[in-house]
Image (tube, helix red, strand yellow):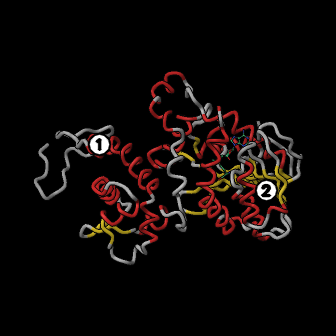
Amino acid sequence: MADSPYPELKKSHVPERVGRPWTDHKPPPSAPVWAVIGGLGSFHLLVAGLELGVFDALSDRGATPSIPPEVTAAELAKELEVSAPHLESLLDSLAVLGLLERVGGCYGLNDTAARYLTSDGAASMASLVPVAPGPLDNWSHLADTIRAGRPAHPVEDNPADFYRPLVEGTFTTMLRAATRADLKLRYSAMTAPRVLDLGAGGAPWAIAVLKACPEATAVINDLVGVIEVAQRHTAEHGVADRCEFRPGDFHTIDIEAEGYDIVALGHVCRTEGPKGAQHLIERAWEALRPEGRLLLADYFVAPEPQWSPHSALMGMTMMASTTNGFPITAAQTAIWLQDAGFKALRLIEPIGHQYAYTATRPQTQEKQG
Ligand SMILES: C[S@@+](CC[C@H](N)C(=O)[O-])C[C@H]1O[C@@H](n2cnc3c(N)ncnc32)[C@H](O)[C@@H]1O
């Protein structure tokens, strides 16, 4: 069939006509491949910008997004004591990536940089960026990991060194998600809930409930070497006196049966593999009083991974660097929750791209399976 002449849309070679997978007569652009090749450089450009203090220096000079860029590369290079032409290339590349503003040869912060890349930005990711991909060396050996079925140097070899900076970096975002979750869950309406936060990191989930409920108390668990982060953050938020810190492996620490109104499993299941994740869900069930609620936050993969690229790639990051980590799907998680006996499942999105299942342990004790 003849194709339609320009400017009408092509009709002969569209997926609706030829089905999927479909291909075109003309060669495809190589842009997707170049985008991936550029990914490595883009990551290191941002890490270098953060390490050199580019964003903080611009912020200190009053370069807010509302003021037109007015700092030259030479001025900034002098202040940061680095090579001016090299810095200029870095700044230009950061501008190309949409992480800085560049107008007429001058540089400034844009909204993204001001919010996420300055140390005191409202949702700073400055300390998260370098550690977010996990140990970089594991990415260079990904094909070997896929051949062998496990990474040569999983983070479990030295978990505290990996998780400490990670949970420092994710704390602000997670506290925002946990705090906003109250709009959907109304934990603030509870009188004196007792909370169990397993693999708490900086304890954002426990802190959100403790701040909303003046009589709430919490048991906070994480590994030795990481739990100190929770101790510091709970103290900074003025709730440490209502917390008991219980260091150790969340699969084996003592947990009181039916002792809690809320159990949080915040971003811990995707590193555990199916058996480990199910074990944590079962532990949460045992810990909850009837009518108690589980909060299970994670990056859940949609039925088609392309619909949830961030979750699919987060899961891949786990696979690259942990012994059991895999992407976990929303559907599989719901089945685990139901198999454990939970009811009233809801998938909430307290802030953009942060998801959590909530599920209730019902009064009746029947469990399926
Ligand atoms: C991705 S962080 C999530 C932190 C926090 N729950 C949140 O939602 O932001 C995973 C946490 O689980 C902790 N963790 C990993 N394995 C653990 C284990 N076997 N026992 C206890 N905590 C563990 C890590 O130290 C880390 O703090």
**Neighbourhood count class around disc 1 (C-alpha, 10 Å): few under 14, some 14–19, many 20 upward:** few
**The C terminus: image quadrant:** top right
Give left or right: position of 125 versus 179. Answer: left
Report the amino acid beneath label 1.
Trp
Give left or right: position of 298 versus 261. Answer: left
Q: Which residue is mark 1?
A: 34
**Neighbourhood count class around disc 2 (C-alpha, 10 Å): few under 14, some 14–19, many 20 upward:** many
- Vertical position of residue 122 compared to residue 285: above or below: below
Residue at position x 35%, y 62% from top? Answer: 78
* 144 and 89: which is toward the camera: 89
Q: How many marks?
A: 2
Residue 64 visible (yes or no): no
| Mark with earlier residue (1, 2) | 1
* 89 and 2: which is toward the camera: 89
Q: Position of residue 341 (x, y in %)?
A: 77, 45
Q: Position of residue 231 (x, y in %)?
A: 76, 56
Local secondary structure at mark 2: strand
Q: Residue furthest bottom?
A: 67
Report the amino acid beneath label 2.
Ile
Residue at position x 56%, y 35% from top? Answer: 321
Residue 57 visible (yes or no): yes
Q: Which residue is mark 2?
A: 262
* 254 and 102: which is toward the camera: 102
Give left or right: position of 20 versus 337. Answer: left
